[in-house]
Image (cartoon, rainbow, N blue to C red):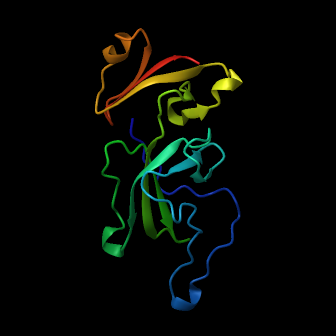
Amino acid sequence: MRRHLGGFTVGIAAAIVSLASSGTAAAYPNIYEGLEIGECALYDRMNQVGGPADCDSVQANYRLVEKYQLAPETAGMECGDPMAAVSYHHRTDDGVRLALYCFANNFRVGDCWNFTDVRERRRVDCDAHEPETSRLTAVYEGVSNAARCHDQNTDAVVWDKPRLTVCTTPG
């Protein structure tokens, strides 16, 4: 399941960097500034908030797999990594794309997730005993085959694009 969300706007009225003196449109603060490949982030689409997160925290639902500084000739660039589940474009206030960040789900064996809303799956605290919680028992990148999990007597969550199979048991 691949989703391109374009550039989401953080729901905080953060100060806009003024570039008016250079004749360039102002840019929103880059909430992922300094984030490196493999590091984690949170993104809550419902509340329109995001930012870096410790990969071991419940909030870390994504990990960075690609990032690019964009120029006018590359402003239309899209994520190329097949595991990228969501992208973020850092933009100016008039929509010019300055950077592209591509994120994959931060699925790790032993973590718990709630998959009830496929569009807004989220990592949850296993100890919270939240309804509909699934504990991940295996993660197979490059594989779209539920039988991989059924052989282990577990349930499966499968994506065709990207090819991904996650085996789960009730959390």
Left or right position of 70 against 109: left
State the image quarter where residue 171 is shown. top right
Left or right position of 95 against 143: right
**Residue 74 image position (x, y, % from top left):** 32, 68
Image quadrant for the N terminus?
top left
Nearest the viewer among 17 and 166 is 166
Q: Is residue 33 above or below residue 126?
A: below
**Residue 92 image position (x, y, % from top left):** 52, 71
Left or right position of 132 against 6: right
Question: Measuring 55% from the left and 35% from the top, which residue is drawn there?
Answer: 120
Left or right position of 153 against 80: right
State the image quarter where residue 149 is shown. top left
Count numbered badges in the picture: 0
Looking at the image, the residue that sits furthest to the bottom is 21
Nearest the viewer among 71 and 167 is 167
**Residue 130 image position (x, y, % from top left):** 68, 22
Question: Measuring 70% from the left and 25% from the top, which residue is drawn there?
Answer: 128
Question: Measuring 32% from the left and 14% from the top, which residue is drawn there?
Answer: 147
**Residue 34 image position (x, y, % from top left):** 51, 65
Question: Measuring 68% from the left and 72% from the top, which residue is drawn there?
Answer: 15
Nearest the viewer among 64 and 4 is 64
